[in-house]
Amino acid sequence: MAYFSKHYHNPGTAPGTLVGKADGGRPVNIRVLDYTGEEVEEVSLANAADCRAYLARDSNTWVQVNGQADPDTLRNLGDLFDLHDLALEDVLNTGQRPKIELYDDQLFIIAAMPLYDGENLEIVQISLFVGRNYLICLCPLDEDPFEPVRKRMRMPNNRRFTTRDVDYLLYALLDLIIDSAFPVLEQFGYQLEEMETDLLERPNQQTLSRIHGLKRELLLLRRVLWPQRELLTTLMRTEDELINAGTQVYFRDCHDHSVQIIELLESFREMATSMLDIYLSSISQRTNETMRLLTIIATIFIPLTFVVGIYGMNFEHPDSPWAMPELGWYYGYPMVWFVMMGITACLLWFFRRRGWI
Amino acid sequence: MAYFSKHYHNPGTAPGTLVGKADGGRPVNIRVLDYTGEEVEEVSLANAADCRAYLARDSNTWVQVNGQADPDTLRNLGDLFDLHDLALEDVLNTGQRPKIELYDDQLFIIAAMPLYDGENLEIVQISLFVGRNYLICLCPLDEDPFEPVRKRMRMPNNRRFTTRDVDYLLYALLDLIIDSAFPVLEQFGYQLEEMETDLLERPNQQTLSRIHGLKRELLLLRRVLWPQRELLTTLMRTEDELINAGTQVYFRDCHDHSVQIIELLESFREMATSMLDIYLSSISQRTNETMRLLTIIATIFIPLTFVVGIYGMNFEHPDSPWAMPELGWYYGYPMVWFVMMGITACLLWFFRRRGWI
Amino acid sequence: MAYFSKHYHNPGTAPGTLVGKADGGRPVNIRVLDYTGEEVEEVSLANAADCRAYLARDSNTWVQVNGQADPDTLRNLGDLFDLHDLALEDVLNTGQRPKIELYDDQLFIIAAMPLYDGENLEIVQISLFVGRNYLICLCPLDEDPFEPVRKRMRMPNNRRFTTRDVDYLLYALLDLIIDSAFPVLEQFGYQLEEMETDLLERPNQQTLSRIHGLKRELLLLRRVLWPQRELLTTLMRTEDELINAGTQVYFRDCHDHSVQIIELLESFREMATSMLDIYLSSISQRTNETMRLLTIIATIFIPLTFVVGIYGMNFEHPDSPWAMPELGWYYGYPMVWFVMMGITACLLWFFRRRGWI
Amino acid sequence: MAYFSKHYHNPGTAPGTLVGKADGGRPVNIRVLDYTGEEVEEVSLANAADCRAYLARDSNTWVQVNGQADPDTLRNLGDLFDLHDLALEDVLNTGQRPKIELYDDQLFIIAAMPLYDGENLEIVQISLFVGRNYLICLCPLDEDPFEPVRKRMRMPNNRRFTTRDVDYLLYALLDLIIDSAFPVLEQFGYQLEEMETDLLERPNQQTLSRIHGLKRELLLLRRVLWPQRELLTTLMRTEDELINAGTQVYFRDCHDHSVQIIELLESFREMATSMLDIYLSSISQRTNETMRLLTIIATIFIPLTFVVGIYGMNFEHPDSPWAMPELGWYYGYPMVWFVMMGITACLLWFFRRRGWI
Amino acid sequence: MAYFSKHYHNPGTAPGTLVGKADGGRPVNIRVLDYTGEEVEEVSLANAADCRAYLARDSNTWVQVNGQADPDTLRNLGDLFDLHDLALEDVLNTGQRPKIELYDDQLFIIAAMPLYDGENLEIVQISLFVGRNYLICLCPLDEDPFEPVRKRMRMPNNRRFTTRDVDYLLYALLDLIIDSAFPVLEQFGYQLEEMETDLLERPNQQTLSRIHGLKRELLLLRRVLWPQRELLTTLMRTEDELINAGTQVYFRDCHDHSVQIIELLESFREMATSMLDIYLSSISQRTNETMRLLTIIATIFIPLTFVVGIYGMNFEHPDSPWAMPELGWYYGYPMVWFVMMGITACLLWFFRRRGWI
């Protein structure tokens, strides 16, 4: 459904209720990446409870859960990492607005990653829990969108990354999430340009439908990107001990991108609205031109038809000199043509003076 | 009445005046739910004054008054629980905007619960008084909308609920009130989608009327939902002793929902406004197409009619070679057809080049 | 004049200049109501200077001046109660925006009371001076709009009113002024509803004119109601010694009404704007329908007229088989009818398929 | 030029560069008014340097420079009164936005005075330098707009004015500048009213052009009046030693006027925008009415013309009973009339039922 | 591409990645201007590393890098002046929004200089690094836009410039960048004026296209000018030791210009939007006029054609007095003319009364 994509429990349901989706049959894929400045270890886990081993270690642990999370996995993770019921409910009920919540010694972040295949815009909800030495990232997609980050961590020279705390990992993931709006907007930009050409050259119902669709998607995108910017403002300014001062300059950069994305979005929205006006003006202009053509044709031929109609009348009275004597004149017929050409010439001159032809 | 649904006293009436409605004949239904961590007791009372017994006890008491409250009941409650005259007046004069007021050792809250049956949107005013160990909830509906909460409290395993103070009960009720906007918006979303299809495929007066109606209801809804969000912001941040710090995380969640609802509402409003533009554009486009058809038909047949009109003229002069000699030509008639087909061909070619046919 | 109703002196006039209006011939009506908790005394005064007697007493005095105040009366009042020149100028030059000004030991308030008779909206400027034990209220109307307050003060059981300070009297007057917007908005609401029906059923120039007029009046109303709300915010929060803490809860109630009125007003304005769009759409839709009818009629009859025109031609050549042989066929005439009915049937089928008929 | 009236130096020019205008040939007119509580002395000076004499005295000096200031005069004044280069540049490059700048012991103010002659709106830049005991006012007009102030100062009873410091003089000048917007807005108000009548009664291209022109002028006016209000807010709140506390109540009054002017302006702007919509609606409504007339005429006469066309056909076959036998009927001709009147009656009934006639 | 001109790395790329553009083949041009109060030295460098010599001296050094910077040059500069990786990435990925960032002992500024050649608007990103005694300015253009500043520094009398710190140089450059928007807006102003005339006199599709184009460029310009204003607000208020208090008055002047530019821009945007409405109204007005002409012509001639059609009918029945007896009347033909002229006169009178002719 295009307008309402939020999952919600029935009003009156107890807070923190976790109910799986009807079609949530596919198993989730849990990948753990445990790193210190010295080494990076990657494993796939069958069960959320197996993370316990990494939690105790003096290393940073990135737990990535891909796929539609089922209530059991969430409950396991919740017990293990001491996650709040309300947060788990938000993870399950996708379609949340991006936000950041500070629990005692944990950050809970919901971010939104836009994906666009040229036709449909999908907003993927990424949920992140950040603790002192772990980061849990839940993504409902089956394939891992964070592979580029993983790749950078695996590279031999990247001690710059692995020697830092998990807040830098958080930055890396958020940066990827934020920046994924750029290709989406680039595509929207191309579409706007196409529409613009269409609008002025050949406006039709389909252009209208496309502009409307784009406007709807820009609105949808905006609904998640604005709170995402606030999220970054909070991160950039927070004085929580989980966020190092040295990482804040990176969050500032990320915030910058976020602002730029929103400004692009807003100007796209404005142009899309303006295009609706232009569509209407173009159509009116075309109607006007059509009307002119009709008026020219009708204004020239209707009087002429009247003239020839006159001489189609059958008045005849052998004795009356008033019974259409023109019909009997020697030059009657050429004179009618002459009159008609005169009328036509006058009208053509009139239309030319008004700039219609 | 669709635009003005506020009850008010005549200007100059003394503050705190309680006057029953003309049709307020039905008796109210008073239900008390008294709970401690150990037990939950439910009774129906005939008279508001009977609440006194529960007030003295060391337990939490939820007094639920369903139905259109009459002045006497309100005065009884007011005397018993020491409620402010202005607050009671607000309870009686429904159509108030949601608000929270802090009296000495009491909170007074007005909330708005939207109900939508697919045709009419009704905003039900819920009035709440919260004291140290009691909560009074007045709802003008005859049937109790808070039955789900009652059910959760009755469940054997729900000590999590009953061991808490009345602020948690307040949260439970407000959460239900806020969340009841989700199904309403979901229905509005479906309607928008339907209208969108109608607009582009078969715009008509009825679609226009529906968009207008939806816009009006969104506006009505917005008028109560914005102050309701402010109410929750206040609750979330208040440092009153009636609200425990541990409950504030729940109010934060509730506030989150409230923000999400408003953002949905605003984007619906924007889409509804955009749809009016699209309606206009669609209609103009259709007028344009109608005009084209008329112009094509008229432009082709009017000159032809003129041509055949010419040869319907009755010029005849036995001796004049100028008296429509064509009529007497051997191939006169086919030639006229030939000329007319030529004209038609030219015009068809002209229209095709312009992309009209 | 509808757009500019402000009285002003020529630029460069000295501040505090008091000039009477050209037509200001009617005498003002000065009524004093002097009250303590024990008794309420009412007198009519001929001269503003006679108030002096009440000023000295240890009672609260309400001086009500009804009618268009002349400069002399104002100067007398000003001397007696030590009113600022600029304030007196504002009293005389009606059409001021509502405001509150704190002088040393005096409050000066300008409020705006809307009156609507179904046709014209009038904004009456009420000027109030509040001192420690007196309140002066100037109202340009001839009859006293505050009679209901006076009545409440006269009632035997109303010690609740008379034992309080003049700030409560100020509240009572402001409450009446604010609440007098409710009946006005109620009438506007009914008008909007009427217009809405008209718009969708029979849009015409008059509806347009009414919507435009309503919009103008809403704008006028809004121009005074917004600053009036700010005025109440100030009163609600002020820590001046003239306003008791116990009265502030009443001002809060008044502020609440004020906010509600503004929200209603804003949604009316939005609906009125939306109605202009709907008017335009309705008209376009009607033009479209008119066009369709014309197109159907013209498209059917123009070709038929061409056909009958053909057989009105006078080709005749006794020897030529090409000279309209159809005219001489046995079934010529029925065949023409057959052809014409065929054309009509095709066109009707075409229009039905497009959903036009 | 209507849209861009700012004077600026080429980008990269050194700050404080003073270049005279090409046409700046007229000499300026320097008038000094020196006053104490005891006496008021007025002189005209030939040279800016001659002000020096007054500067040393223990009196207040008002230096008024009328006419397009040339760089030399400005440099002289600048040297004498120690004016900042950037301020002098702003005086010369007219078209600045109103602002207030606090230099060490000097205030620099740029204000904008609107003048309207019914056709063109001119914004005159007034530059003011205020020191401890002098005020310099530069005005590019040739005649002095501040004559009314001068007149008040000359009056015998006006010690209230002359005993005060120069900040009161500043108030008097600013008050005149601000209030000069009232007559301008009054004229705009009349024009709006005229346009409104035109719009609904006889919309035409010229009305459109006037609305557009008014909108442009309101926009221009708004661009200077908003910063002027901020200027007054600053003056009203400043704690600079150049502004006495006793004068601030006057600046508050002035600020009040400024707010009122802006509110009027904004509502005019809104009405002008609304009028564009009404223009469009009116035109559409007229097109609709025109269409209806055409459709009624065409729908009635086109079928009738077809009918009479039928009996203009020349089918004749002496032996065939099918060759237009109607032509030979005894009542043929009246029957045709009967049929045609029947058709007309039906169509008229149809149009009446639709409410078209 | 008109809508999306931002360069960005693929989401997930490491921060501070420097990748040259595909076409970035041209060598950059590095010019150093080293100045003290005594002397000004200018050199062109082949290699960024050669700046090292100037860095050590006790003079102010302005390093100007013109042309599309390649990653190597940037890395060299970065190593030499200790520039942050994220800043260098921003220099390379042009299309950033203007901003100011405070690193430990360095300011990093991105500014946007608009260039307009009458057809295309180009936004040039200028990157500035300011340290204690150096300023690095990177500009992707091949020719140096800051030549006017260089010229002022070379002038013999300009010790006012060279004796100051680099913050004054920063001001001089920013002033030039900001002020370069004035000529752009001046051109836009002229275009608006042209369009306005076109709109009201001869609206056509091309005008529409130009308005739309201008709106897009104003939007683009606005997207960079707003953050540029914020940048100047920061500079004006910053208490960083790199900015002297004496220079802040210059930044204030610069900020003033920035505000003025934005206000002009916003009013241009508003007028452009208003022009779209006027275009639509003009077109509708023209359609209306076209319709009127058609209606007048059709309404006059269609009934006349019907009349002449009547007497073209061939009813003849030798014995029937009903078989079009008019045809045989003595004054039949003149009477028809008389009737037709009567009809015409009535219609002309009708049209004149409605004000159509």
Image (cartoon, coloured by chain):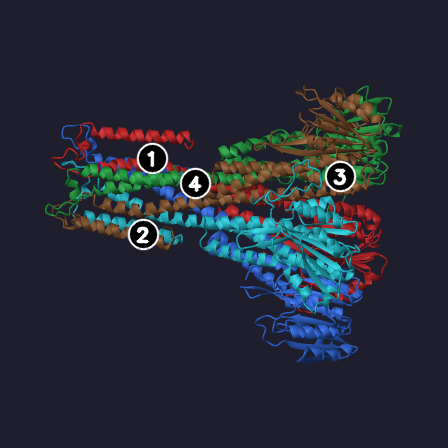
Chain colours: A red, B blue, C cyan, D brown, E green
Q: Are marks 2 and 3 in contact (CB under 8 Å)?
A: no
| Residue found 67% across the figure and 19% down from its top | D25
Check disc 1 and report the residue beneath it. Answer: A300
Viewer-proximal residue, E191 or C154?
C154
Q: Secondary structure at mark 1?
A: helix
Residue C321 on image: x %, y %: 17, 38
Q: Which mark is residue E231?
A: 3
Kindly indicate whether the residues beneath marks 4 and 3 are on one polypeptide chain.
yes
Give the farthest residue toward the left. Answer: E319
| Residue at mark 4 shares a chain with residue at mark 2 | no
Is the residue marked by circle 2 packed among few (<14), some (14-19), or many (20+) residues within 10 Å? some
Chain ID for label 2? D
Q: Alpha-carbon distance for marks 4 and 3?
A: 51 Å
Marks 2 and 3, Cα distance to the nearest angstrom?
A: 72 Å
Q: Quadrant of residue D239?
A: top right
Is E189 situated above or below E347?
Answer: above
Task: Identify the element where label 2 is drawn.
Answer: helix
Q: Residue at horizontal 71%, vertical 80%?
A: B50
Mark nearest the camera among 4 and 3 is 4
Look at the image and tell me in which quarter the N terminus of chain D lies: top right
Q: Quadrant of residue D251?
A: top right
As shown in the figure, which amino acid type bears the numbered disc 4? Asn
Asked whether residue E97 is in view, the answer is no
Q: Which residue is mark 4?
A: E288
Q: Is residue D49 left or right of residue A317?
A: right
Percent position (x, y) of residue E19?
Answer: 73, 38
Q: Are discs 2 and 1 located on one and the same chain?
A: no
Q: Is residue A184 visible?
A: yes
